[in-house]
Amino acid sequence: MGDEIMKIVHIADLHLGKMLHQYNLIDIQRELLENIIDYVSHHEIDAVIIAGDVYDRSVPSQEAVNLLNHFLSELITRLHKKVFMISGNHDSADRLNFASAILEEQGLFIETYLKEKIAFHQEGNIRFYMLPFVKPVHIKQVFEDAPTDNYHNALAYYLSKQEIDPSYKNILITHQFVGHKSQTSESELTLSIGGTEIIDPDIFDAFDYVALGHLHAPQYVKRETVRYSGSLGTYSFDEAKGKKSFVVVDIDDMHIEEVELQSRQKVRIIRGMFDELRSHASNKDDLLSIELEDDHMIPHAMDLLREVYPHVLKLSYVKLIGDASTSMGKVHAIEKMNMMDLYKTFYQAMCNQQLDEKDQKIIETIWEEGTK
C-alpha cells in the first residue's frame, strides 16, 4: 500500500462467537470474513475500519479469538492493509486493547478507552478519529462538567471540546445509537431507556465520513456519509429479510458503495402447513424459523421437521398465536419493550392508573445509575 489512503472498507458488529438459538454461527462468520478478505485482495483497498462489537461477549470463546486473529493477520501481514478498530458495547475494553501499542507498528490501530483529547491517526491528508462506545458517565469522568442526562448531550459536550481541523479529510469511527428513525433489530442490545441513548447526527458535522457501529441494518442517517455498515451476518430472525453488506468508501470524492455479503447457509423464515413443508423441502441446511399454519398442535413437530430440515431453530403456530391468552405474540411484544415501557405497563396493571411524569423521572434516574 502506498503512503496515501484512497479507499477504505467499513465493517462493524462482527459479533464473533455469536449463537443463534444455541446454534454456533462461527462457520458462517468465517465464510463471510473470507469473502471480505477476498474482496480486499482483488480491489484497490487501502484500509479496513471495524466499528465495534468485534466479539459477541466480553469474554469471547477461543474459536472467536482465533478467527479474529486470522482475519487481522490476512489483512495486515499478507495484504499489507491498515486496520482501524474500536470497541463496542459487547466488547471488553481491556481484552481488545491488549498489546495495542506494539500492534500499531504493524498497522493495526485499536482504541477502546475514551481520552480527553479524541484519539486519531493521520495517514497523509486523512485523519481517522477513533471514539469507542461510551456512556455519559465515561464522558463525565474525563470532563466533570459534562451532562449525563442523555447520550446526545454528553457526546455533544465531548465533541465541543475537540479541535477538528477542516483542512484534513476527517473520518470518525464510533459505536453509538445515532438517529431517531434508524432501523433496529432484536439482536441489538438496548443501551438505555426512554430514548436517552439516541444521538442526533448533526453533532458529527465536522467529519467528512462517520463510520458507525451498533445497529445491524445497513443504513445511512440523515446524510449519506453518516453510515452504519450493518452487522457481518444475520443474527436474529427479524433480520432474515434484510440484506447484509459492507461499505466501500472512496475518500477522495466520498463515493460510497455497498457490497452485499452472502453465506451459503442462510437464516430464513418459512411458513406453511406441516405436511407440505415436510414433502416440499428446499435449502435444507439453512437455519430456519418455521411458522406452521395448521390449526392444531402437532405432536413432536420439531423432531419430525428436523428429519427434513436439520437446523430448525424455532417453531411457532401462527394461527394459534392470536387465540391463546398467553400468546407468543404478546411475548414478542414484551421482548421488544424497553425497561421504561415494561415498568409503565406493570404499574398500570397493578395500580390501575398511569405512571406520572415525576415518578417516571425517578425510575429513569434509578435505572441509569444502576447501569453505569
Image (cartoon, grey):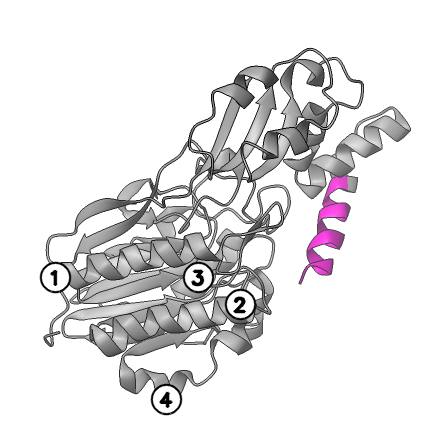
| Residue position marked by numbered label 1 in the rendering | 44
| Residue position marked by numbered label 3 in the rendering | 52
Mark 3 to mark 4 CA distance (whole Å): 20 Å
The disc labelled 3 sits on which kind of residue? Gly
Which quarter of the rendered picture does the C terminus lie within? bottom right
| Residue position marked by numbered label 2 in the rendering | 139
- Name above or below for residue 270 compared with residue 261: above
Where residue 100 sits in the image (x, y, percent)? Answer: 41, 82
Label 4: which secondary element: helix
Q: Say if residue 118 shows up in the picture.
A: no
Which quarter of the rendered picture does the N terminus lie within? bottom left
Where residue 47 sits in the image (x, y, percent)? Answer: 23, 67
What residue do we see at 50% from left, 25% from top?
Answer: 270
- Name above or below for residue 180 compared with residue 165: above
What residue do we see at 67% from left, 33% from top?
Answer: 303
Q: Earlier in the sequence, mark 3 or mark 4?
A: 3
Residue 206 among those drawn in magenta = no
Of labels 2 and 1, the one closer to you: 1
| Residue position marked by numbered label 4 in the rendering | 102
Crowd rating for badge 1 (residues with CA inside 10 Å; few <14, some 14–19, many 20+): few
The disc labelled 2 sits on which kind of residue? Ile
Query: Magenta segment, which residues?
Result: 360-372
